[in-house]
């Protein structure tokens, strides 16, 4: 009995509007520099540090992209194979049912982590969109 974990998510290999994002990034740092020297912004720190927040969001998007690929290309197939192997050996009576349950739990944990990473990736893209005004996901 084959067991498959379902994953299908499209990642951006190169963000759309990369030049616009870089221009917005430069503008955000320019705005941050003005914030530091303008007294009216001293009392509202949320209006400053857009450049740092944008850089952090881009870093999170890059890291989660790599982790998603690792899960998609390595960990998920490995967990699926381990589960199928434990099912096969259970059917012929070589392992206990607890071994199958452990393999199911591990496979589901890997799949859950995959979707958590996808959510983190989408959050990072939304934050980049917020600071740049460039639509990255459709």
Image (cartoon, rainbow, N blue to C red):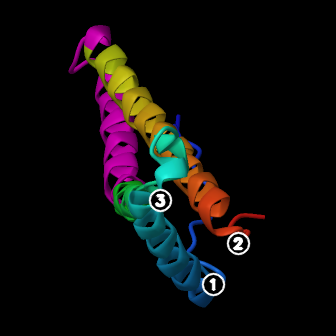
Residue 78 got which mark?
none
Q: Residue furthest front?
A: 39
Quadrant placement of the C terminus: bottom right
Q: Residues within 10 Å of mark 1 (few under 14, many from 20)?
A: few
**Residue located beneath label 1 in the image:** 20
Q: What element does badge 1 sit on?
A: helix
Label pair 2/1, CB-CB below 8 angstroms? yes
**Residue located beneath label 2 in the image:** 134
Q: Position of residue 133 (x, y in %)?
A: 71, 68
Label pair 3/2, CB-CB below 8 angstroms? no
Q: Main secondary structure of the magenta part?
A: helix
Say which residue appears at 58% left-offset and 90% top-offset. 19
Say which residue appears at 41% left-offset and 36% top-offset. 113
**Of 135 and 116, the residue lying toward us:** 135
- Disc 2/disc 1 C-alpha distance (Å): 7 Å
Q: Position of residue 49 (x, y in %)?
A: 43, 55
Say which residue appears at 26% left-offset and 17% top-offset. 99
Mark in front: 3 vs 2:
3
**Residue located beneath label 3 in the image:** 38
Instruction: Report the span colored magenta.
Output: 70-98
């Amino acid at each position: 009995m084959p067991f498959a974990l379902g994953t299908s998510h499209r990642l951006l290999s190169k963000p759309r509007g990369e030049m616009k994002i870089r221009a917005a990034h430069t503008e955000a740092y320019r705005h941050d520099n003005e914030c530091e020297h303008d007294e009216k912004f001293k009392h509202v720190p949320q209006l400053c540090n857009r450049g740092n927040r944008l850089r952090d969001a881009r870093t999170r998007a890059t890291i989660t992209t790599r982790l998603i690929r690792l899960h998609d290309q390595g960990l998920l197939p490995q967990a699926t194979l381990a589960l199928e192997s434990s099912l096969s050996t259970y059917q012929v009576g070589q392992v206990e049912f607890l071994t199958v349950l452990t393999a199911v739990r591990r496979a589901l944990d890997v799949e859950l982590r995959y979707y958590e990473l996808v959510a983190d990736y989408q959050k990072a893209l939304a934050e980049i969109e917020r600071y740049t005004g460039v639509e990255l996901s459709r």
